[in-house]
Amino acid sequence: MKSRIEWMTLAVGVGVLLFVLELVRKRRLKEEYSLLWIGASLVILGLSLNRPALDWLSRLLGIYYPPMALFVCGAFFALVLAIHFSLVISRLSGESRTLAQEVGLLRLEVRELKERLAGRSGRGDGGGESGPAPGAGASG
Amino acid sequence: MTGQSTATAGPAAPDCPATGRLLVIIPAFNEECALPDLLASIPARVEAVAVDALVVNDGSADRTARVAVARGGRLVDLPFNVGIGAAVQAGFKYASNRGYSYAVQCDGDGQHPPDQIATLLAPVVAGVAEVTIGSRFLKQGATYQTPLLRRIGISAFDWVNSLVVGRRITDNTSGFRAYNRRAIEFLSRHYPHDYPEPEAVVLLARNGFSIEEVGIEMRERQGGRSSITFLRSGYYMLKVLLAIFVEVFRERILPEGERR
């Protein structure tokens, strides 16, 4: 007979697993990021189904109340996920900064090329906002 | 103003070592008021060096971009605000791509006097230093007044950076700096973000760049607001100090042979 807390962790584990799988199926979550979630929910599920394993783990960790070991596992996974996200965010913000710089540099190049073209075709309509900038075409 | 004068200045042979081109990098965030005067007062050439001005518009909400183009500056228009570090680095990338021999970094708010670019650049052109920093505190009888909290922060950086770099840099937060080609290429690849000035000093020194300070008399800002407000300056100090300590424990970027 399982205690109420075990039923609860079982339900949460199944719920998280199904939810993550559904997100992956709908392509809203990349497989790369789902692995940690699936791993976490599988471990929690396994421990809530297998009482001897849970008892062994809690003895190993020195936890007197075995279901508490489940929460320790959950907290550990949450920590790993948080660090993983920080890494991903750092990478993304660096990449977006580089992209912004590239966009700015390309805009300048497009403006210069437009001005050079407008100058060649003899006072063309000069595309939009750029206008007649005096410093155009001086670069080598 | 910018490049126009190159045609009138006579036949400057491209392989003549004393000449070269200087790019003045002006990071600007909502500086439509200060920018016209600044661009107008940038000299067309410094000694034998031809000067171009590059405004880096860091996602301003005002007419900074239009003012810059109308006044004849080259403009790197960033699609959103990326912070002063990344904005200045965009300038280094431009200078690196276009083969500039020198770069000067000059704030868009009018604090840095363009008429002293020559003073700042001289040691770099002469090959005495690869990087120069315009210091408010080196010149005798300088009239520039800094708020107390800012001064505490500045002296903290002074102390820490002196310890790390091994020589005294009096004005680590100064963004009025000149660089040679090697420094331009290095910084176009590696430049600290957010509040980069004190960190850049450590980064450059640790990678073997020779740094000199030059006494500069700075002005009050002509418009706009400092990116460092009173409340945030504590956070700013902690963050930069942490970044400096991290920098010290990082691997050096340039290998032993490429350092000088």
Image: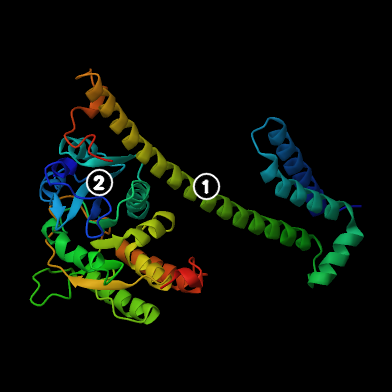
Which numbered tag is attached to residue A92?
1
- Comparing B14 with A73, the one in front is B14
Residue B147 lies, with reference to residue B186, above or below; the image says: below
Residue A129 on image: x %, y %: 24, 27
The quarter in which the N terminus of chain B is drawn is top left
Check if mark 1 and mark 2 are on a common chain: no
Write down the quadrant of residue A54 in the picture. bottom right
Give coordinates of residue B244: x percent, y percent: 41, 70
> Which numbered marker is on residue B38?
none
Residue A140 x, y percent position in the rendering: 28, 41
**Left or right: where does residue A34 sit relative to residue B42?**
right
Label 2 sits on what residue type? Leu
Depicted B202 relative to depicted B96: above or below:
below
For disc 1, the chain is A
Residue picked out by circle 2 = B54
Q: Nearer the viewer, residue A50 or B194?
A: B194
Q: Is residue A52 above or below residue B27?
A: below
